[in-house]
Amino acid sequence: MKISSPRSSFLLAMAVSACFLLSSRAQSDKTTAAPGGSANTPSATDTEKHDDSFQIGADDVLAVNVWKEPEISRSIPVRSDGKISLPLVGEVQASGETPKQLEAEISKKLAGYMSEPEVTVIVQQIKSQRFNILGQVAHPGSYPLSNPTTILDAIALAGGFRDFAKQKSIYVLRQTAPGAPARIPFNYKDVIKGKNSAQNVRLEPRDTVYVP
């Protein structure tokens, strides 16, 4: 009877391990690959991320996707009259609607041309929501409120203070209800020292920051 040497046993074990790994990898590839496409290809049932409470406004840019209909799907800005226009759909009101509501309206209009249209609307760029900053800053004007923005952020976006700005007497005017706007004080000197940090509120659409 021939006894295998330790070297022969080691080589045999390595060969068996290699075959096992190749077999496992092939099986994994079969499991993850989608028929007719790659494993990473998104399907119509993928969850799309958009805020259902957000109201679309003029100048916002929307990504409208109709499943398996590339001729209709497109990136499109909302016109100043609040409408968008799509093939087969025609004009549809977008301003004042949420993405979900607009999806339902487009689907309703497409139902006469195709069976069970799957429509997704995502807000690609938010341009309708803006704030104003006026007074003694380098670049006063209107700015998009596309990301969470505090008073400190607004001052930085406007290029900082001019020489004679009254940094302790800044305030925000906010329309909270019909009538006079609310006035929110902001003491820049205190906030940057870590005092009264609650004054550095997040701005809302149509807020006006005033730097005397």
Image: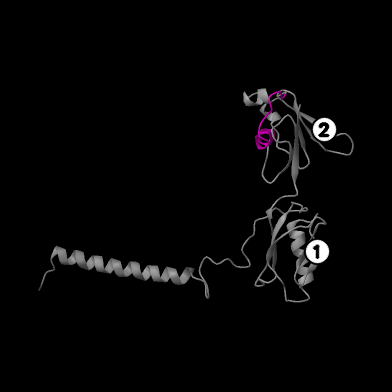
Q: Residue at image x 79%, y 59%?
A: 94
Which amino acid type is marked by label 2? Ala
Q: Residue at image x 77%, y 38%?
A: 207
| Residue ID for mark 2 | 182
**Where in the figure is residue 96, as x and y percent of width and height?**
81, 54
Q: Is residue 57 left or right of residue 158?
A: right
In front: label 1 or label 2:
1
Q: Is residue 133 above or below residue 20?
A: above
Work out whether residue 95 or residue 5 is closer to the camera in this orientation and state it.
Answer: 95
Q: Quadrant of residue 191?
A: top right
Q: Quadrant of residue 4?
A: bottom left
**Where in the figure is residue 3, as x and y percent of width and height?**
11, 69
Label 2 crowd (10 A; few <14 / some 14-19 / many >=20):
some
Q: Is residue 161 above or below residue 157?
A: above
Work out whether residue 66 or residue 28 is closer to the camera in this orientation and state it.
Answer: 66
**Where in the figure is residue 107, as x and y percent of width and height?**
75, 68
Q: Is residue 70 left or right of residue 142?
A: left
Work out whether residue 59 or residue 138 is closer to the camera in this orientation and state it.
Answer: 138
The mark found on residue 70 in the picture is none
Please, what secondary structure does the residue beneath circle 1 have? strand
| Residue ID for mark 1 | 92
C-alpha distance separating marks 1 and 2: 36 Å
Which corner quadrant holds the N terminus?
A: bottom left
Please, what secondary structure does the residue beneath circle 2 have? strand
Which range is magenta? Answer: 151-165
Magenta stretch holds residue 196: no
Q: Is residue 83 above or below residue 198?
A: below
Q: Is residue 77 left or right of residue 1?
A: right
Which corner quadrant holds the C terminus?
A: top right
